[in-house]
Image (cartoon, grey):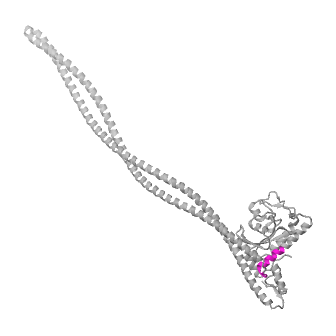
Amino acid sequence: MKQKSGRTVGVSRLLGRLSRGEATLSDRAWTLSPLAWPLTRFLAGLRERFVAMRQASIDISLNTARLQTQTLACRDMAREQAAEAEGLATRGGQIAAMSEQTSVSVNDIAATFHAQTQVAHDTLQQLNELHQRVTRVAAQMEVFSGVVSQLSQRALSVEDTSRLIKDIALQTHLLALNAGVEAARAGDAGRGFAVVASEVGKLAERVNSATGEIVKHTSEILGLVADTRGKTDQIHLDMSSSDRMVNQFTVSFDQFVREFERMDGQMNEVVGTVSQVNLTNQEMNRAIARIATLSSQVEQRMLTMDDQVMAVRAKSERLQEMLAALRTGNTPFDSLVHALESMSAACTKLLLQAHGQGVDIFDHHYRRIADSNPPRYHTAYDGAIERQLTQILDYVLDQLPGGFYTLLVDNSGYCPSHNSRYSRAPTGDLDHDTRHVRNKRIFDDPVCQGAVKNAAGVLCQTYTRDTGEIVTDLSIPLDIDNSRWGAVRIGVDYARFEEMVSAGAGKPEVH
């Protein structure tokens, strides 16, 4: 950028203009006084130091804004992490409690399972004993069936013998009758033989009668033996079937007991695993609680850091305000201040013209525009100055390399107009209207409030937009009839602005 220096006649006059802010440190005294050269060198050295200090303060502000952005992001992440850690700690405590309860329940189940396994062993032993007894009874029934069969055979033999004896008794009785008849024929000679024959006949009748009784009882015995044998055979079949069933059940139950034993072993492994999981959960719960505590501490430290960053930002802005009062001249910063002052003069002129036409430019009765979101407002004067004010704002912004916005706000933060790029027609979409419909809104953010509350002089503030861009906001108060009306603001990417102005992009101003 081409360096230009002003000339002032006389050393004392130059010093007076410097003290009133009417001259810059790059101006020179037009005089033959021997103090002129030493003063020139002193002012040049002083200017270099002030320029370096201003640049350093701007760099501090830019870095502070970046640091604040990171701090806020870290604070939000720390807050989110603390909330998540707190929730995780709560859930971890619940899991630890459930794990402890599960461990107790599993131990109880394992103990019950082990006891049932022992009961199953005892039952299997009883089944084996029952199988053995059933097997013995089946064998005994088989022997008994053989005995009954032999008894039946003996009874049949007795019956056959009895029938034979009966037949013999009948034949003997017949022979006795025949002998009696023959004895009767023989007369007295056969009388003795007749007596014997009669006794033999009687004896044969008794034998026949006794034999009949024997046959009768033998038949009854044979019936009973046959019935006993049938029932014995049925019992033997039932016992054999029971023996097979008991044997099959014993084999199945033995397999069941083996599975029970295997499951008992697995339950013991589960108990060990659950105990290990419970121990791990307890340790994890303690670690999570520690993380929650540390996250809370980090959040508190980030809040403290944010406060400290804000303090550094405030001090750097105060330093810039003090340095801005010393006009160094021929720097990008001076060009930006010059553009700000020119824009302020043009806005003041426009407001005074409207005021002279009877427009109430101090109206604070903000009337909300219907269906506007974010809220936008009309005043008594916004319609009267909107078109010309937009032209002024756009003209200055077009000349600012790296410019973000140029803005006029009243002492409440209300902007009656904005740059054309931020004055699009509303669509009803909140995100679109928030970004692109910014005219006639009231800005109550800290940067705008700092601008309208600034007592005097140039205020330089640096902040991060919601898009992540670092904005350097320069503002000066605007007074009408010795009354504070508001402020004019210029927002730029100062690093880009400085680079392009230094490269000869020109000095912005308003005519």
Q: Extreme right residue here?
A: 357
Boundaries of the magenta span: 328-343
The N terminus: image quadrant: bottom right
Is 115 positioned to the left or the right of 139 in the image?
right
The reply to whether residue 250 is in sight is no
Does residue 178 sit above or below 242 in this rendering?
above
Is 175 positioned to the left or the right of 482 in the image?
left
x and y percent of residue 92 in the render? 54, 57
Is 241 positioned to the left or the right of 351 in the image?
left
Is 186 positioned to the left or the right of 349 in the image?
left
x and y percent of residue 77 in the render? 63, 64
Near-viewer residue (231 or 481): 481
x and y percent of residue 445 in the render? 75, 65
x and y percent of residue 388 in the render? 87, 69
The reply to whether residue 36 is in sight is yes
Q: State yes or no: residue 307 in magenta.
A: no
The chief SS type of the magenta part is helix
The C terminus: image quadrant: bottom right
> In which quarter of the view is residue 61 placed?
bottom right
Q: Extreme left residue here?
A: 189
Q: State yes or no: residue 340 in magenta.
A: yes
> In which quarter of the view is residue 458 placed?
bottom right
Near-viewer residue (268 or 75): 75
Near-viewer residue (423 or 358): 358
> In which quarter of the view is residue 376 placed?
bottom right
Residue at 73% over, 82% down: 49
Near-viewer residue (229 or 419): 419
